[in-house]
Image (cartoon, helix red, strand yellow):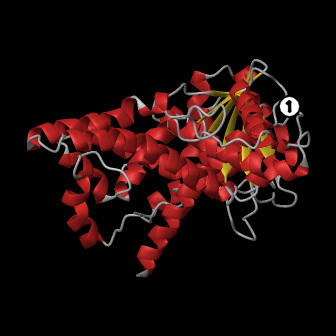
């Protein structure tokens, strides 16, 4: 890989981690609130936006995984980029009811004027003077370079400096009075552990598992909020309810229901046997779409359960046998009745069994666990069994698909 390619790859990784940091920091913020009506959103007016007790709190996050993250100073490009972002949203907020936070993983340069932002003292004339001086230094440097026909310096902070200089004295004072700087914040690798440590009310052996499941739920809800599948904001009440549900599941050793509304990744490719089974009974595109979605959900759910407890493999295996028995009772009868039927009739009978797996099986087969109502697991598990040729839809599916199974290296458990 060339140097430029490596640089691009590292840049993409940093951007991805930066966004994930926003997601986890939003969760941590909401988790630490004491106000029941608190709510957060990501990528709204700022990286993270928190509404709590009638106030709006905006957060700009500067993340780093470096062992020695850069210190922040009044000359830092991150400071002036953040300033430009905040000045741009001033028309959309009530400035006297909004607090602006700059979150950094690193520290502040010793003796830097920004140190005053560590306090809540709203009177900050020295800081305003220092920022005005720095902004003017950048402006003059660019003007001189332009006059001399040289490349303009400070391109990474010039917009922020100009925006600050254009503010009135009152606007500068009001904005600077509302800014907080929070250095030494946890990085992306530390937040889940910080949440686990904050669950002091729970037994120590439960905290890491509750935090892990909470993060998994949070990531999904956040994606849904960004793509319009749920409200834009996530409320603290939702977070509290999810914690209670996870704890209840753990205390009764229940199987979690993590994928009820989850969608497969856009690039998900199901096993070819799934579609071959459905093509054999002339299933419609909608039959295929449902089968792929539910198979992915059930497969992911099994993975989560096995990661949580290897002993769940026995529960999964036992339930597969229950599903196969319900399927066999139907399929055996259909197979016997179809012996004298033509090909079209067999396909129709098989299609009925496929649609039974979608529509009726979740209501007629007992759940895998007491109180478990994840119907997707029934539908998806039958599809997993169909992929393995342990069940099928066409009366003669084994005869038709044996060659395809042998070619793909698959074998049945029979």
**Residue 145 position within the rendered picture, expressed as x and y whole percent measured from the top left:** 49, 61
Which residue is more in the foreground, 37 or 180? Answer: 37
Instruction: Determine whether 218 is above or below 360 in the image.
Output: below
- Identify which residue is drawn at 35% across, 33% down: 356
Toward which corner of the image does residue 247 lie, by quadrant? top right
- Binning the other alpha carbons within 10 Å of mark 1 as few (below 14), some (14 to 19) or many (20 upward) gives some
Toward which corner of the image does residue 122 lie, by quadrant? top right
**Residue 6 position within the rendered picture, expressed as x and y whole percent measured from the top left:** 46, 75
Which residue is more in the foreground, 366 or 135? Answer: 366
**Residue 299 position within the rendered picture, expressed as x and y whole percent measured from the top left:** 49, 52
Instruction: Determine whether 205 is above or below 149 in the image.
Output: above
Residue 251 horizontal side relative to residue 233, left or right:
right
Task: Give the quadrant of the C terminus.
Answer: bottom left
Say how many tags the image has. 1
**Residue 276 position within the rendered picture, expressed as x and y whole percent measured from the top left:** 23, 53
Which residue is more in the foreground, 327 or 236? Answer: 327
Camera sees residue 157: no
Which residue is more in the foreground, 345 or 133? Answer: 345
- Identify which residue is drawn at 62% across, 51% down: 315
Could you tell me which secondary element the residue under label 1 belongs to?
Answer: loop
Residue 253 horizontal side relative to residue 260, left or right:
right
- Identify which residue is drawn at 67% across, 53% down: 62
Residue 410 horizontal side relative to residue 244, left or right:
left
Residue highlighted by disc 1: 122
Task: Give the quadrant of the N terminus.
Answer: bottom left
Toward which corner of the image does residue 102 lie, by quadrant? top right
Camera sees residue 358: yes
- Identify which residue is drawn at 17% across, 41% down: 347
Instruction: Determine whether 338 is above or below 414 in the image.
Output: above
């Amino acid at each position: 890989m060339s140097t430029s390619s490596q640089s691009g790859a590292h840049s993409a990784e940093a951007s991805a981690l930066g966004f994930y940091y926003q997601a986890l920091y939003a969760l941590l913020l909401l988790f630490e609130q004491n106000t029941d009506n608190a709510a957060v959103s990501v990528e709204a007016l700022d990286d993270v936006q928190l509404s709590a007790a009638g106030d709006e709190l905006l957060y700009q996050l500067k993340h780093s995984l470096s062992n020695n993250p850069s210190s922040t100073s009044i000359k830092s490009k991150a400071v002036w980029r953040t300033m430009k972002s905040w000045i741009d949203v001033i028309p959309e907020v009530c400035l006297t009811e909004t607090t602006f936070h700059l979150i950094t993983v690193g520290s502040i340069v010793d003796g830097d004027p920004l140190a005053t932002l560590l306090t809540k003292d709203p009177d900050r004339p020295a800081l305003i003077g220092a920022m005005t001086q720095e902004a003017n230094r950048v402006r003059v440097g660019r003007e001189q370079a332009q006059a001399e026909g040289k490349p303009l310096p400070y391109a990474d902070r010039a917009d922020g400096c100009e925006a600050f200089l254009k503010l009135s004295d009152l606007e500068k004072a009001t904005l600077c009075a509302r800014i907080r700087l929070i250095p030494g914040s946890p990085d992306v690798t530390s937040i889940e552990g910080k949440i686990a440590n904050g669950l002091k009310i729970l037994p120590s052996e439960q905290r890491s598992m509750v935090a892990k499941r909470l993060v998994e739920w949070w990531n999904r809800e956040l994606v849904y909020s960004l793509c319009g599948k749920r409200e834009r904001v996530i409320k603290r009440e939702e977070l509290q309810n999810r914690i209670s549900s996870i704890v209840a599941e753990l205390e009764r050793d229940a199987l979690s229901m993590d994928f009820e509304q989850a969608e497969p990744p856009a690039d998900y490719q199901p096993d070819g046997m799934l579609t071959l089974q459905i093509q054999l009974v002339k299933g419609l595109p909608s039959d295929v779409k449902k089968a792929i979605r539910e198979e992915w959900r059930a497969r992911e759910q099994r993975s989560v359960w096995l990661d949580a407890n290897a002993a769940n493999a026995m529960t999964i295996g036992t339930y597969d046998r229950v599903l196969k028995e319900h399927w066999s009772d139907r399929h055996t009868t259909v197979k016997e009745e179809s012996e004298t039927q033509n090909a079209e009739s067999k396909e129709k009978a098989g299609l009925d069994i496929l649609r039974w797996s979608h529509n009726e099986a979740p209501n007629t087969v007992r759940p895998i666990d007491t109180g478990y109502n994840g119907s997707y697991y029934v539908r998806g598990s039958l599809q997993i069994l169909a992929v393995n040729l342990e069940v099928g839809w066409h009366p003669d599916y084994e005869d038709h698909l044996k060659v395809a199974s042998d070619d793909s290296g698959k074998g049945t458990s029979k």
